[in-house]
Amino acid sequence: MKSTRIFLLASLSLSLVACNDDSDNETNPDKSDLSIPTTYSFESSLNEGEESVTYTGQTKRHILINDLTAAIRSLSDDATRDVAADLNFFFRFDGSSSDTVNYNYSISGETITPGPTYGDISSGKDLIGKIAGEDPALIDDEFFGWSEGLDATPTPVELVDYFFSQIDAMATDESTEQITLTGGNSVAIDKVYISNKGHDYAQLVQKFLLGAVAYSQGTADYFKTDFSADNTTPDASGAPYTTLQHKWDEAFGYFGAARNYNDFSDDEIAGEDGRPEFANGYNDANGNGIVDFHSEVNLGNSSNCAKRDRKATDATNFTKETFDAFLTGRAMLNSGKTLTADELTDLQQAALTASTTWEKCIAATVVHYINKVIVDMDNFTADDSYASLDAFKDHAKHWGEMKGFALGLQFNPDSPFRNDSTSLNTLKQLLALMGDAPVLADGTQNDVAFTGGVVQYRADLITARNTLRDVYQFSNSNAETW
């Protein structure tokens, strides 16, 4: 289990005290002690005795992404369906007509709440309205990293629509795409969302939306709130939280961590092992026999942080560093007082720590899938083909996860890739090295012979991995073994 000690942000001048009691600032006004709970739970500074944390819209978007991904994976070839429309049910969700529909998200063997309808989670809300380029605006009015099927000035919405169109075409054409195995035998690809060019669109869509919606919203929108503003009045009539408190909570909601994230081990967050009550990535913290996915389940990138920590050969602590930064900032805002200049500096440092460590989790996950793709390529057979259909599908899956996550690295204005034009060009070059499709066993990429073939593309991926290692200061051991 991770220590319950609060991670001390290096540049904070505050003395941070991990406890659930009120600070002694009132009786000792000369002290700058800040009382921080060990869980993400804060009593209202406005309405005594009420909980002030809420981020239901963010939870709903996590569920929409999960349900959209499940819908893609469930597709079979059916010429009578409008698959793009089916997928847009989730992406362009219309609460006025669909909030009464039951969501599909579930946890095996558990009763979950809120539910059973989308409206029970939060009214309204969609994905398209919160994707980068819609809200917030694209950084420097530019989206990059994918060109296939897009126009000269692409947007994230256009890329999602392109992915949907490709899935629709494969799922309604009443034919089955083929892949050549060793010995020249052709077999049908048994998943309609995987193309014979090696695109796993379920992975591409899910991982891209985690970056273009969840990560973009958290870092480029909510963490860019003017936190020097008034922090004394309620966000809305009768709300138990101020506007600034709520903005911080919404960023936390997009990270996706359970409120007692620090009580989980990395294995438990990743759903890999641990105590029975934690081992599947969730914990019924209040013991009521119902799992609240708004507060008791680890969703989105919060799980990726643990996956990388648990496999680091040189120890990392992305989970704790991110979560404790979120705790620190929220505790500062929970005073219900407008921040002083020094306090604002400390809050901005907490936001920077949360956003950049969150980004390290994503970048380390890109490294992980680069390594997976390299292993897939090393397993190509001597006759430049795949040993089995599963080998091809693994290659497509890993490449889709690599590229989908990598595209998200452009959405944080505080990313190390945003330091200057040179560092930004480095990210563009990294995404270009990956291309818009994997290089397959026959040496083609998007049906065109790749210059230098498999050997060159493998070298390109190692260059991309080394770039991420250097930019995020990962150890060479971690970069090679994640």
Image (cartoon, rainbow, N blue to C red):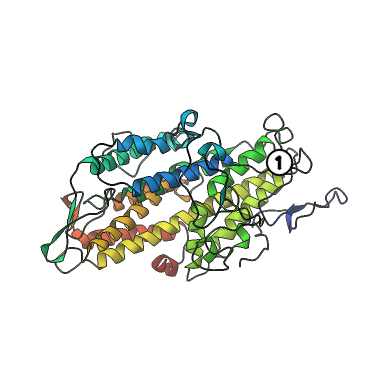
Q: Residue furthest toward the left?
A: 184
Q: Residues within 10 Å of mark 1 (few under 14, many from 20)?
A: few
Q: Is residue 54 left or right of residue 94?
A: right
Q: Is residue 84 left or right of residue 419?
A: left
Q: Which residue position is annotated with label 1?
A: 341
Identify which residue, 248 or 359, lies in the foreground: 248
Q: Is residue 80 above or below residue 466?
A: above
Badge 1 amino acid = Ala
Q: Determine the residue positioned at 47% across, 47% down.
A: 419
Q: Is residue 110 above or below residue 345?
A: below
Look at the image and tell me whether residue 293 can be seen.
no
Q: Residue furthest toward the right?
A: 27
Dot 1 falls on a residue whose secondary structure is helix
Instruction: Give the percent coordinates (x, y) of residue 287.
Output: 66, 57
Instruction: Give the percent coordinates (x, y) of residue 159.
Output: 34, 39
Q: Is residue 287 left or right of residue 158?
A: right
Instruction: Give the percent coordinates (x, y) of residue 385.
Output: 17, 63
Q: Is residue 321 above or below residue 25?
A: below
Instruction: Give the percent coordinates (x, y) of residue 454.
Output: 21, 61
Q: Determine the residue positioned at 59% across, 42% down.
A: 55
